[in-house]
Image (cartoon, grey):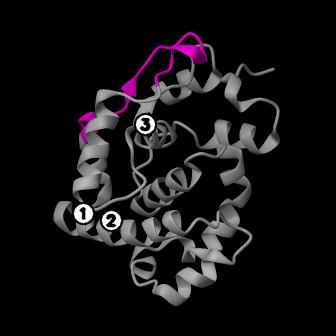
Amino acid sequence: MKTRCKWAGSNPLYIKYHDNEWGFPLHDDKKLFELLILEGAQAGLSWLTILKKRHNYRKAFKNFDPEIIAKFDSAIIEKLLSNKGIIRNKLKIKAAVQNAGAFLVIQKKFGSFDAYIWHFTRGKPIKNAWKNQKEIPSKTKESIAMSRDLKKMGFKFVGPIICYAFMQATGMVNDHIVDCFRYQEIDLI
């Protein structure tokens, strides 16, 4: 039996996410955009809620294509507000549209969102060595800096805690506990 981070629990969806995605260094702009939007949608909710709705999000948000989302008008936003498959929060939906536009500006300015976002960790994952989940912070100086900069660039729903969760999910930090089987696997990347 594999030792996992305790947050993965026994839910098959959480276990699959933990084992195959969470904490793996991610450099694909479209997937980075997806996770940034989903982390913002998760604010105040559980990540499991978002995982259960991720397929619906991909469909409603056109596979997280920022060029399409940036053009969503008020009629599309109203339609999304009636979509029971996603979180129907007007501020979060409008933020996703605004964030798509800001994302495109960053891509143009830095060549890729990946190049921009990874500069907060100097282009490589921060390796932590937590023995238990209680040691893991909810934000760090890097997530605070990322939050400030993203907000300056026009992003919404990117506070320091959301940014740190994004950093964990995208492997910018290795926050698997040291006895988790993924800790060493990710460290070898």
Q: Is residue 127 magenta?
A: yes
Above or below residue 68? Residue 18 is above
Above or below residue 100? Residue 35 is above
Give the amino acid at mark 3: Tyr
Q: Are marks 2 and 3 in contact (CB under 8 Å)?
A: no
- Tell me the residue that label 1 is attached to: 106
Quadrant into which the N terminus falls: top right
Q: Which residues are magenta?
A: 120-137
Counting from the top left corner in percent of width and height, residue 175 is at: 50, 25
User: What is the distance, in whole Å, between disc 2 and disc 1 at their CAs?
Assistant: 5 Å
Mark 3 Cα within 10 Å, few/some/many (few <14, many 20+)? many
Q: Residue at x 51, y 41 (%)?
A: 169
Counting from the top left corner in percent of width and height, residue 70 is at: 39, 78
Mark 1 Cα within 10 Å, few/some/many (few <14, many 20+)? some
Give the amino acid at mark 2: Phe
Outermost residue, left direction?
109
Q: Residue at x 40, y 22 (%)?
A: 127
Q: Are marks 2 and 1 in contact (CB under 8 Å)?
A: yes
Which is nearer the N-term, disc 2 or disc 3?
2
Q: Can you see residue 67?
A: yes
Q: Tell me the SS state at disc 1.
A: helix
Outermost residue, bottom direction?
75
- Tell me the residue that label 2 is attached to: 103
- Tell me the residue that label 3 is attached to: 164
Mark 2 Cα within 10 Å, few/some/many (few <14, many 20+)? many
